[in-house]
Amino acid sequence: MLNKIRDYCRDLLESKKVEGILAVYTENGNYFPYFFTKKEELNNLCIDKKYLLLNSVKPLRENLVFLLQSKMPGKRIGILARGCDERALFELSKRGQVNLDNIETIGYSCNEEQAKICTCPTPYPTVNLKFGEKVEGVSEHKRWKEFSQLDIEGKRKFWEKEFSKCIKCFGCRNACPICFCKECLMEDRKFVKGGELPVEIPSFHFVQRYHHAAQCISCGECEIACPMDIPLRLISFVLLNRVKKLYDYTPGMNPKQECPIYTIKEERNEEALDELL
């Protein structure tokens, strides 16, 4: 699949259909995002290592695609995208962070092993899949069965134990492709006290997760980044299921479907709301 992708990208560059292609570059065992503009460079294009291309650049708090589009307004760029990259593009576009009209998405699928690492429910692009086959994703978090059998008090103790491990490194926030705020409210001392561990519960984690309730793209980067092995994707898994039940919405699956959090409607889904409560 790699050679086919490289050939396809060469054709895009030679035909000048795109100004360049954002993908992962590998050299001497190192991997990093790179904007390929010359066909000779494509020999270093890599697809076997995951590197989410939509992460925000610190301290600018702007994602790489936004920066490229700002530098080359009106120009078309290519993006070699996994399923999570495509979902991030769709959600960021709904918030004015990227312009999909000037993006050529080159979608390729992950394998089952990669899906398990990220606990990804949809390890392939749903709209722009060009390379690879659709493989079965992970339908639930590895700790869901344990968590779902707990009563309310048990769940409280579960999260109290897990969050007591937090060292406030902000790795989960920094790894998230949907976090693009210039100033993060979660750094405010009203929510997170300085010089104290563990982090005050539930101010930081629950506020952040509810903030992402209808925009989490299930990439798993937050949980992968956490040095304390807190099951952060489990919170997202619960919230995403509830958003699906209430609003029939899954973030990143449809670029034209409005996010329900930003949509006001008169009717209420009473049956789903009663079940949620």
Image (cartoon, grey):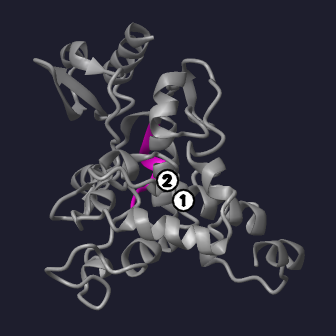
Residue 216 lies, with reference to residue 270, above or below; the image says: above
User: Residue 150 vs residue 192: left or right?
Assistant: right
- The residue under the point 35% across, 41% down is 52
Instruction: Name the one closer to the observer, 92 or 10.
Output: 92
Q: Which mark is residue 236?
A: 1
User: Residue 86 vs residue 184: left or right?
Assistant: right
User: Residue 194 vs residue 174: left or right?
Assistant: left
Where is residue 3 drawn, in percent x and y? 38, 8
Report whether residue 254 is seen. Answer: yes
- Residue 92's quadrant in the figure? bottom left
Residue type, numbered disc 1 = Ser
Query: Which residue does the numbered mark 2 point to in the structure image?
Result: 233
Instruction: Name the one closer to the observer, 11 or 86.
Output: 86
Q: Is residue 32 magenta?
A: no
Q: Residue 211 carries which label?
A: none
- The residue under the point 35% across, 14% down is 6
Q: Residue furthest top?
A: 3
Disc 2 to disc 1: CB gap under 8 Å: yes
* Range covered by the magenta-colored residues: 97-104
Residue type, numbered disc 2 = Arg
Q: Does the magenta stretch include residue 98?
A: yes
- Residue 270's quadrant in the figure? bottom right
Report whether residue 106 is seen. Answer: no
Residue 183 lies, with reference to residue 154, above or below; the image says: below
Where is residue 63 drawn, in percent x and y? 29, 55
Q: In which quarter of the image is the C terminus?
A: bottom right
Element type where label 2 sits in the image? helix
Element type where label 1 sits in the image? helix
